[in-house]
Image: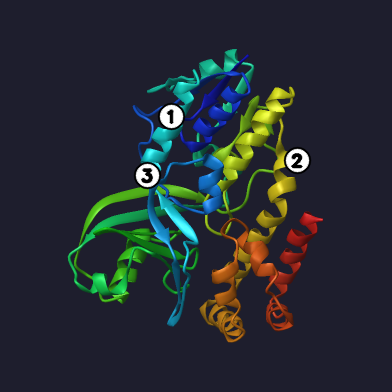
Amino acid sequence: MTVHILGGGPAGLYTGLQLLKRGFEVKIYERKPDIGLSQHCTGIVSKRTIENYDLPQKLVLNRFKGVSLKISDNLIEVRTSIPKAYRIDRYLFEKELEYRVLNLGGDIILNYHDVSKIRSSSEYIVDATGSISYIKDVKSDFLPSLQLEFHATDSKLYDLFDDETVYLFFDKELNRDFFIWLVKYLDRYIIGSASLQNLHKILRNTLSNWGIRNYNIIARYYGFLIVGGPRRRFYSDRRDSVYVGDSAGQTKPSTGGGLYYISIASRILSKKFSEGELDYSTEFYKILGKEIALQKLARLIFLELDNKEFINLVEIMSRKELLNMLLLYGDMDYHATSMLNLIDKDILKYLFKHPRIISEGIKIISSIF
């Protein structure tokens, strides 16, 4: 039996690879002229994610041993002796998946746009077309994103940043919707964020606040981050399609990252297909449902607190060394669960002052059990 996969990004390629291993014939349809074009992701992943995809070490660009967390004027820096996160070359990552698919006999059709023809003639269709599919259906819970890749022409940059540290910035007066991140690799830097506000202005102002005004932009990467969590059901009777990856909203609500979720979803999907079933939602949520719900709660708290309130919460956590413990010992793929284990009565007492956090939080927590 042939499975037709719409979209040749990580979700489409990895799902195709898993299906090929289970004996299915696979055809992947990509609208771009090549695999790996138009990258929107920084590529920061956990060691577990690298192992799930069995990626060669040549794909690893950065090995992060430090985290620098700046919240308004408050700075928390933690460094470990071993890497806590990694940054992979997203283009080479997708080319690696392409090679594996082709090596197992999969078929990849590039420059393909007539999706309606596939939908009308195919029994098994996997929608891996990305965030646009999710946005068309859900129409909310997403943010435009922008990353700027630039060369340093200002000597201050060399003193401020190193390539073994992930830099995270929270300032709700600068960006009320999301945090700002920065990584360095050799002589290049990538700064990015997501917001309904003017992203160019946010990133320019962030650099300006550090006193950095002289830099040459090499590339701009535009995209969308899904921040509302996955669809409740990954199979659509109306479209007769199974969703995976960004199409299914399988990204972390707190960070927008999706590669770890894709590695889990694709394996479950391929197993259910081999059993003759099309919907794999229940199995996916058994593994990741609690973490996703807690991340949605963490994002709700971030959105509800103003800058002063958010800083006060961080100061409570800092006095108790909770943030340091989270950065040192927390699980990158299950960071909301790690955070829950650190919450004490003082933090709960502070959050109880916000009625919407309590009412919405109860709904979110109730969905776990």
Ranked by sequence position, the earlier of labels 1 and 3 is: 3
* Closer mark to the observer between disc 1 and disc 3: 3
Residue bearing mark 2: 282
What is the distance, in whole Å, between disc 1 and disc 2 at their CAs? 29 Å
The answer to whether residue 65 is seen in the rendering is yes
Foreground of the two, 204 or 136: 204
Q: Amino acid at mark 3?
A: Lys
Give residue 183's position: percent from left, percent from top: 36, 61
Spatial CA span between label 1 and label 3? 16 Å
Q: Give coordinates of residue 252: x percent, y percent.
A: 58, 53
Q: Which residue is painted at 51% across and 78% down in the image?
A: 307
Identity, as a three-letter code, of the amino acid under mark 2: Thr
Give me the C-alpha separation between circle 2 and circle 3: 36 Å
Quarter where residue 231 is shown: top right
Name, please, the residue furthest toward the front. Answer: 81
Q: Which residue is mark 3?
A: 58
Residue 212 drawn above or below residue 23: below
Looking at the image, which is closer to me, 246 or 338? Answer: 338
> Residue 233's spot in the image, x, y percent?
70, 39
Residue 135 visible in the shown view: no
Q: How is the image coloured?
A: rainbow
Q: Residues within 10 Å of mark 3 (few under 14, many from 20)?
A: few
Query: What residue did someone put label 1 on?
Result: 98
Q: Amino acid at mark 1?
A: Glu
Along the horizontal axis of the image, is 351 left or right of 184? right
Q: Quadrant of residue 5?
A: top right
**For the residue labelled by badge 2, is the local secondary structure a helix, a strand or a loop?**
helix
Which residue does the image show at 65% across and 24% down from the upper left?
A: 240
Q: Kindly check if marks 2 and 3 are in contact, taking CB atoms under 8 A apart as contact.
A: no
Kindly indicate the quadrant of the structure image that contains residue 346.
Answer: bottom right
Q: Which mark is residue 71?
A: none
Classify 10 Å Cα crowding around label 2: few (below 14), some (14-19), many (20 and above). Answer: few
